[in-house]
Amino acid sequence: MSSYDVIIIGSGPGGYVSAIRCAQLGLKTACVEGRDTLGGTCLNVGCIPSKALLHATHMLHEAEHNFGDMGLKGKSPSVDWNQMQAYKQNTIDTNTKGIEFLFKKNKIDWIKGWATIPEAGKVKVGDDVHEAKNIIIATGSEPASLPGVEVDEKIVVTSTGVLSLNKVPKKMVVIGAGVIGLEIGSVYARLGSEVTVVEYLDAITPGMDGEVQKNFMRILKKQGINFIMGAAVQGTEASKSKAKVTYKLRKDESEHTLDADVVLVSTGRKPFYDGLDLAGLGVEMTRRGQIAVNDHWETSVKGIYAIGDVIEGPMLAHKAEDEGMAVASVVAGKHGHVNYGVIPGVIYTHPEVANVGMTEEQLKEEGRAYKVGKFSFMGNARAKAVFAGEGFVKIIADKETDRILGAHIIGPAAGDLIHEVCVAMEFGASAEDLAMTCHAHPTYSEAVREAALACGDGAIHM
């Protein structure tokens, strides 16, 4: 029987980052993973492969729509779907092998197989039982579905199956207008699919800034994506090569059907902890089926911790990474901290959408006085030069103190630009602090400064 200071169950972003930090802090560390490769959902069938396809299809879009205007003449490239899939797989392999290298470098044992926890302090994998002073559950999440929707990962698919379709479908129906649905919908729309998004609510990307929602949907419509809003999906019916989606419009209860070659079910994700027997261990759960933890990420069972998608909070890889590093510090007898008020979110469409902190809607609900500074990318020279002038930067600051409370960006490189605001918020900066910081010209980042200036005396280029 092997013995460890800590065993992490799951090698996704939360798990592998936690394992590396535990090892760096001098703890004898092992990580249990049942997949053939490390990296969890994110690296294998989530964030990384989807970004590869988003990048490839954005290059296709540029060639088809913008190259000619730049004087780049010639036939538009044709799509070799098999080669694009090979590129995607190579991206996955490079990243997962990188994690394996980091495990070897940090002397972390990879225990291959699926884990159970027979009792506190013990992890069983196959026939082997390993002792651990501490156990960290980082098993992530899995796609959620709807009643009446049967997934076969061929015609009716989740975010996993949609990444490896045999061919580009002529018609695709996306159930759910959240991050995953819109990213994948963008991929296939660029490839020539007729994409229709069916959403139960009246706005896309639930929980995001209302102004961003409206502008984002307008831009996606211009890109050819169709939307049916306020629609409750009743079920799907699949044959060998086709599917029908039945839905009811909430406004009048009328029933309708859509034909599709592929249906993507992107109605969110749910915590995954199958086989761990948490009930038998006496681990307390939340009402929503998440693992309940205290301020130190410890469950109701001493010595068992949980992080990432299995606990409360946004299901984001970087949130799990932060928790992974923090809980490693706790296990090592140090202080662990995560600032949940400064966790950015990004949608990797084109343009990108990014946010951090509070929305106007949340502040109005709180009754808090605030001010808004906005700047359009049409006033940004760099953005206009690369056909990326749509969108804006919006900074929200406290009306009295000028402290930055949130930021919402739709535009080029939004996923990178948002971190300037994240750092500012981490240090409790004011909008004026950001506005008085010199920004290089010409860069997209000038739009962030201009939005900060707009919180005060006014933007310069608007």
Image (cartoon, grey):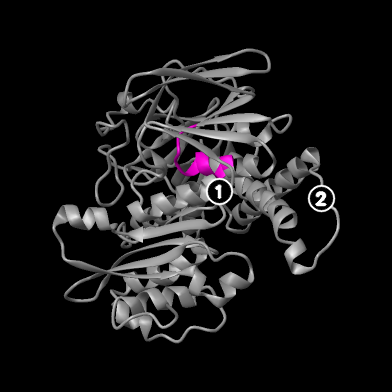
The type of residue carrying mark 2 is Pro
Mark 1 lies on a secondary structure that is helix
Density class for disc 2 (Cα within 10 Å; few <14, some 14-19, many ≥20) is few
Which part of the image, by quadrant, shows the C terminus? bottom left
What residue occupies the far right of the structure in this picture? Answer: 74
Q: Which residues are magenta?
A: 175-185
Q: Residue 402: give x, y in percent of width and height.
A: 23, 76
Mark 2 lies on a secondary structure that is loop
Residue 139 appears in the rendering = no
Foreground residue, 143 or 7? 143
Q: Residue 461: give x, y in percent of width and height.
A: 45, 80
Q: Quadrant of residue 78?
A: top right
Q: Residue 245: give x, y in percent of width and height.
A: 51, 20
Which dot, 1 or 2, sits closer to the camera? 1
Kindly identify which numbered label has been placed on residue 77: 2
The type of residue carrying mark 1 is Lys
Q: Height in image: 234 above or below 438?
A: above
Density class for disc 1 (Cα within 10 Å; few <14, some 14-19, many ≥20) is few
Residue under the point 74% across and 68% down: 70
Q: Residue 304: give x, y in percent of width and height.
A: 34, 41
> Could you tell me how many numbered marks the image carries?
2
Q: Height in image: 233 above or below 411?
A: above
Q: Is residue 358 magenta?
A: no
Foreground residue, 354 or 245? 245
What residue did someone put label 1 on?
A: 222
Name the dominant secondary structure of the magenta segment. helix
Foreground residue, 444 or 141? 444
Foreground residue, 370 or 16? 370
Residue 411 appears in the rendering = yes
Residue under the point 41% across and 85% down: 437
Q: CA distance from mark 1 to mark 2?
A: 22 Å
Give whichever of discs 1 and 2 has the lower sequence position.
2
